[in-house]
Amino acid sequence: MATINRFEDLEIWQISRRLAKEISLITNREIFRNDYRLKMQMKGSSGSVMDNIAEGFEREGNQEFKQALSISKGEAGEVRSQLYRAFDNEFITEQELEDLKTRYEILSIKIKNFIEYLKNSEFKGNKYKK
């Protein structure tokens, strides 16, 4: 794997950023005014996916990064659940539900794979270098 010096270079962060933007655009629709709490939960969860990836990377330790990635993966699952709620309330179409759900599932797999990579890596992070 190539050396990554910035969290912005991580594919999982880039994907999560794009998805967070899409969630933001969807939840800015007028129909979401009927459920402000769901709107804010969806924006918060989708933003937390990318934010936890960034935070974990910046902690410069393998263990801390794995923990933050685990939280990101959980947040991605939370967004998927919220998408069902949005669909059930007729705020999004079935096509939007399926598309975003699939893309969040793929992101979760990529995060899981990256966690596994870190588990098997001898690199422990800059924090642990002498």
Image (cartoon, helix red, strand yellow):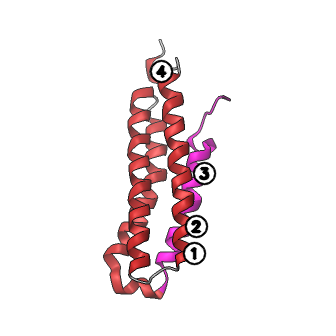
Sequence-wise first label, 1 or 3: 3
Q: Residue at x 38, y 36 (%)?
A: 67
Q: Position of residue 37 (x, y in %)?
A: 31, 75
- SS under mark 2: helix
Q: Residue at x 50, y 48 (%)?
A: 108
**Amino acid found under the numbered disc labelled 2:** Asp
Q: Is residue 17 magenta?
A: yes
Q: Residue furthest top?
A: 130
**Amino acid found under the numbered disc labelled 1:** Gln
Contact check, label 4 and label 3, Cβ < 8 Å: no
**Disc 4 residue crowd, few under 14, some 14–19, many 20+, Cα 10 Å:** some
Q: CA distance from mark 2 to mark 1?
A: 6 Å
- Image mark for residue 95: 1
Q: Which residues are magenta?
A: 1-29
Q: Position of residue 93 (x, y in %)?
A: 52, 80
> Which residue was labeled with disc 2?
99
**Disc 1 residue crowd, few under 14, some 14–19, many 20+, Cα 10 Å:** few
- SS under mark 4: loop
**Amino acid found under the numbered disc labelled 4:** Lys
- Image mark for residue 14: 3
Q: Residue at x 50, y 31 (%)?
A: 116
Q: Position of residue 20 (x, y in %)?
A: 52, 62
Q: Is residue 79 visible?
A: yes
Please tell me whether mark 1 or mark 3 is closer to you in this view: 1
- Image mark for residue 124: 4
Q: CA distance from mark 4 to mark 3?
A: 23 Å
Sequence-wise first label, 1 or 4: 1
Contact check, label 1 and label 4, Cβ < 8 Å: no
Contact check, label 2 and label 1, Cβ < 8 Å: yes
